[in-house]
Image: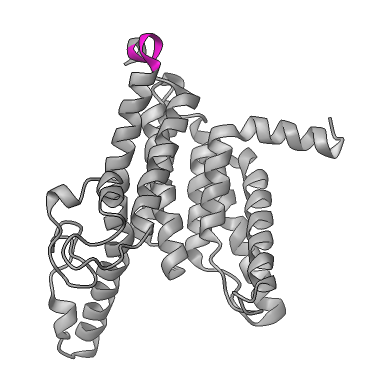
Amino acid sequence: MTELFIQQPWLAYGAVGLFGLIVGSFLNVVILRLPVMMEAQWRASAAEILGQPATQADTVRVNLSQPRSRCVHCHTPIRIRDNIPLFSYLLLGGRCAHCRGRISPQYPAVEMASCMMAVLVAWRFGASPFMPAALVLSWMLLALAMIDWRTQFLPDALTLPLIWLGLLLSLGHGMGLARIDPATAIVGATAGYLVLWGVFQLFLLLTGKEGMGYGDFKLLAALGAWLGWQALPMILLMASLGGALFGGVLMALGLLERGKPMPFGPWLALAGWLTLIAGDTILSAYLSISGLR
């Protein structure tokens, strides 16, 4: 792999980008189905506790492989040739091959984002031992950001494994499998969780309202486990500024009512990924612009 990046870099980046498209197609399935699967599980558990029969909707088998992908308009199963990541969407003009109903642009957007993130990770880390881990982190952040954007929910099924994976990889710091050592990862995960938990408790005390969800604490803990406690201030600053600016624009356009909740997870995910890719560059630019360097 190292020789391929050196001798044929464009071929290597093309292969990584193509793989990113394929992963992006799978991420679309995760983004759409994981919340449905978890809601069905919650309903079934609640019904069992209350001694009530499960509803028909909760007994339908839904997982990441079943049922087959279908058109949301005519419910026709999507053929393999019409399900090629990005290319099928372009060839079909963004419409179902059977009923010509419009296909959500989320599908090609996630696939393209997955592809671009993969290429940038390959460019940033090359054929290093850390590159596969960075790809996993990038794709999980993309899935979490999209799920939170759609549902305002960050599932434990993704955030908790991300925390543990970051901590485990830190054990291989000396072999290049992680960017930080175990002590830094543990402190980062702990600090990431406690910082937002403290903000949550303070906001609740002052206003009587919950300003964010526990999934945000866990996501920042995961970023601390992967990137270390030193990265947390930058992540929080970028996420807060990005969310505030975007929310302000939406309110100015009348697309967001004042006081209406807006997901914070996508901004944490974006800030974490930017820190992964270009944290040193961003910090240097900030220090130069602010006159601190």
Residue 242, x across and y down, in percent? 64, 55
Report the residue at 24% width, 48% height from top: 88
Q: Quadrant of the C terminus?
A: top right
Residue at 60%, 75% in the rendered image: 256
**The image quarter in which residue 231 lies:** top right
Residue 182: x percent and y percent? 49, 34
Instruction: Note whether 139 is above or below 35 in the view shown.
Output: above
Q: 114 or 231, which is in the foreground?
A: 114
Q: Is residue 212 left or right of residue 32?
A: right
Q: Is residue 4 left or right of residue 183?
A: left
Seen at 37% across and 8% down, the residue is: 7
- Residue at (54% x, 34% y) in the render: 277
Which residue reaches farthest right? 291
Which residue is nearer to you in this view: 98 or 165? 98
In this rendering, does residue 262 appear at all?
A: yes
Number of numbered tags placed on the structure image: 0
Specify start and end residues of the magenta stretch as a single range: 4-9
